[in-house]
Image (cartoon, rainbow, N blue to C red):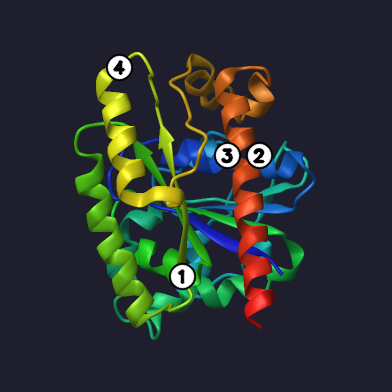
Amino acid sequence: MAKVISFANQKGGVGKTTTAINIAASLAAIKKRVLLIDLDSQGNAGTGLGFVRASHKQSVYGVLMGTASIAENILTTAVPNMHLLPASAKLAGAELDMLDLENREYKLRDALNAIKDAYDYILIDCPPNLGMLTINALSASDYVIIPLQCEFFALEGVQHLLSTIKAIQQKWNPNLDILGMVLTMYDKKLGLTRAVEEDVRDTFGDKVFKTVVPRNVRISEAPSHGKPALFYDFKSTGAQAYLRVATEVVNALEKRNQTCHLNF
């Protein structure tokens, strides 16, 4: 049964979607069956995989509203072993549209139960806010990965997110756990970058992945070609960094599974 992992940060521009796409592609490259869910109305995860929104009718919106089957809305991507449940512009109004739905916090979780056995990993790209869509994602998830840009306000923003995760654990999903934080847009030449990394690692310790994702032009170029960095330029420093992060993700999950078995 699939492990469900959300990528969340209420700050925009931290590399959240890029991280979700490239970790998904990296997992698929090592023969894992992966579904990427785009919960952001901007639809950047789909665009980054080469999908033009107007060219397909499939969307996660109907799945959340209970008017469409999840299986019928999944697209096959050009990346072997990787599928996409795309966003639509209608997601921009989903917060209001879901107000009167019963058990609205669990709509995504309940839908995923129908397809979990078909995948090894289900990754969810959350919108850059902490509203109902993100609550749905985190309520459906086993783990959350937090992409964190190396900037001055990084720690302030992540503390807000951690408060939200704690609230979701208490109200809707007691099994939710933070798998890790990944430092993005890393520029080792900048003193601020190194200072932020030191602060984050001092504060969160082994919750921070060892691999950092550098600022890399190939990562920036890849979405305009509709490809993950791994398939756009395999040898680029950005693609190789995401491969290492994906390896850390797999290892972290295996370590948790071993711990659970020992406790059992």
Q: Which residue is mark 1?
A: 176
**Gap in Å between the C-alphas at discs 3 and 4?**
22 Å
Look at mark 3 in the image and give the residue it sits on. 245
Q: Looking at the image, do the residues carrying marks 2 and 4 touch, with CB atoms under 8 Å apart?
A: no
Q: Which one is in front, 181 or 70?
A: 181
Amino acid type of the residue that numbered disc 4 sits on in the rendered structure: Leu
- Closer mark to the observer between disc 3 and disc 2: 3
Mark closer to the chain start, 1 or 3: 1
Contact, CB < 8 Å: mark 1 with mark 3? no
Q: Report x, y in % for residue 36.
A: 59, 51
Whole-number angstrom distance, CA of label 2 to CA of label 1: 24 Å
Location of the C terminus by quadrant is: bottom right
- Which residue occupies 47% across, 32% down? 212
Which numbered marker is on residue 25? 2
Q: What amino acid does circle 3 point to?
A: Val
Badge nearest the viewer, 2 or 4: 4
Rounded to the nearest whole Å, what is the CA distance between mark 2 and mark 4?
Answer: 29 Å
CB atoms of marks 3 and 4 within 8 Å: no
Q: CA distance from mark 3 to mark 2?
A: 12 Å
